[in-house]
């Protein structure tokens, strides 16, 4: 698939925002009121801001963005619609949590309940995003059980990196978020390694013979077009194998650097700032590769022997 930068921005920004929001909800459950109103406001605004930027960017690759709201109507059958519904429902819950957690609304007894709901809604939205891709049987690379766990741990790892960076700026104790961020980072690396290994080892059994039901004797006699068309450019995008290997290695190298910086941040919190920036770079690399390696079965029609 041809990676649309709007979708890369969407999955990177909203994933980080939902991950940060989920962690803030769990912090509220554990610790109650924060020690700083400004810290609470900054983290909440950053989380909701990243979510909003991501959701708005997801409409940029649509032919008629003003009709994006119609996607919400098919929630009974479509994971895309469920994602939209979950995203919309997260806003009022998160805002209510933000008001009581920051102390702007004097209802401290509601922090735990609203914090748990906020974390649940945030992670549910990320879950539905992952399911959109995991249920696409037409793209072998995405249609596997590790797609959703990778999305969830990606959100938690990026949210954890952002929280540690903000805590360092405010001179706050990272508390229990540091081990959670480290665990999420480790799980992300392991799951992504397994994801790519499973993708490489999966049989390329989607052929023209299977598509037509006529067996392996089917051969394409003539290509359908004399020049490249829109479907070939968007769904037939191919990233060279050597480039894919380099980008995968770069992603793991960046994750290792982030892990080392987060460990160093335990003694010197300032290291959390470059860790967050490097993680976002790694996230962009991984997201681009995720879409670029998605090979659609429609390419069989244009001469691809298997998909």
Image (cartoon, rainbow, N blue to C red):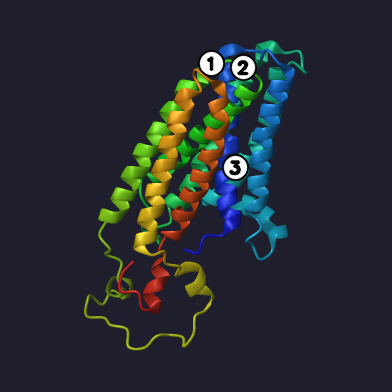
> Circle 1 sits in a helix, a strand or a loop, which is it?
loop
Q: Nearer the viewer, residue 170 or 43?
A: 170
Q: Nearer the viewer, residue 62 or 67?
A: 62
Callout 1 touching callout 3 (CB < 8 Å): no
Give the vertical position of 141 relative to 171 (above or below): below
Residue 119, picture quadrant = top right
Residue 19 showing in the rendered view? no
Inter-mark Cα distance, 1 to 3: 24 Å
At which x and y percent is residue 256? 40, 36
> Which residue corresponds to the image point at 54% horizontal and 28% vertical from the top-left?
272
**Residue tagged 2:** 172
Q: Nearer the viewer, residue 125 or 14?
A: 14
Callout 1 touching callout 2 (CB < 8 Å): yes
> Which residue corresponds to the image point at 53% horizontal and 31% vertical from the top-left?
161
Inter-mark Cα distance, 1 to 2: 8 Å
At which x and y percent is residue 285? 48, 50
**Residue tagged 3:** 14
Give the vertical position of 152 relative to 24 (above or below): below
At which x and y percent is residue 75? 57, 48
**Residue tagged 1:** 175
Front tag of 1 and 3: 1
* Total residue callouts: 3
Front tag of 1 and 2: 2
Inter-mark Cα distance, 2 to 3: 25 Å
Instruction: Tell me which numbered mark, 1 or 3, is placed earlier along the sequence.
Output: 3
Q: Nearer the viewer, residue 55 or 187?
A: 187
Q: Which mark is residue 86?
A: none
Where does the C terminus fall, quadrant-wise?
bottom left
Instruction: Tell me which numbered mark, 2 or 3, is placed earlier along the sequence.
Output: 3
């Amino acid at each position: 698939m041809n990676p649309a930068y709007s979708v890369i921005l969407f999955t990177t920004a909203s994933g980080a925002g939902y991950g940060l929001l989920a962690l803030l909800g769990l912090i509220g459950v554990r610790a109650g009121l924060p020690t700083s109103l400004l810290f609470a406001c900054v983290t909440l605004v950053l989380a909701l801001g990243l979510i909003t930027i991501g959701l708005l960017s997801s409409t940029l690759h649509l032919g008629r963005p003003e009709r994006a709201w119609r996607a919400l109507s098919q929630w009974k059958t479509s994971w895309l619609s469920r994602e939209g519904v979950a995203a919309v429902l997260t806003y009022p819950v998160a805002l209510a949590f933000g008001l009581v957690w920051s102390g702007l609304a004097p209802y401290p007894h509601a922090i735990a309940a609203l914090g748990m709901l906020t974390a649940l809604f945030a992670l549910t939205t990320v879950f539905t995003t992952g399911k959109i891709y995991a249920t696409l049987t037409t793209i072998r690379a995405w249609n596997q059980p590790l797609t959703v766990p990778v999305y969830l741990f990606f959100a938690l790892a990026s949210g954890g990196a952002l929280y540690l960076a903000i805590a360092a700026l405010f001179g706050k104790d990272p508390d229990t978020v540091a081990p959670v961020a480290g665990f999420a980072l480790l799980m992300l690396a392991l799951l992504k390694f397994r994801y790519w290994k499973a993708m490489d080892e999966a049989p390329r059994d989607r052929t023209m013979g299977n598509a037509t039901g006529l067996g392996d004797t089917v051969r394409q006699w003539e290509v359908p077009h004399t020049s490249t068309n829109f479907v070939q450019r968007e769904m037939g995008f191919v990233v060279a194998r050597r480039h894919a290997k380099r980008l995968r290695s770069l992603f793991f190298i960046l994750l290792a650097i982030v892990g080392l910086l987060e460990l160093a941040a335990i003694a010197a919190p300032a290291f959390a700032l470059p860790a967050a920036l490097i993680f976002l770079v790694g996230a962009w690399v991984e997201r681009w590769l995720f879409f670029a390696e998605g090979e659609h079965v429609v390419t069989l029609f244009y001469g691809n022997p298997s998909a």
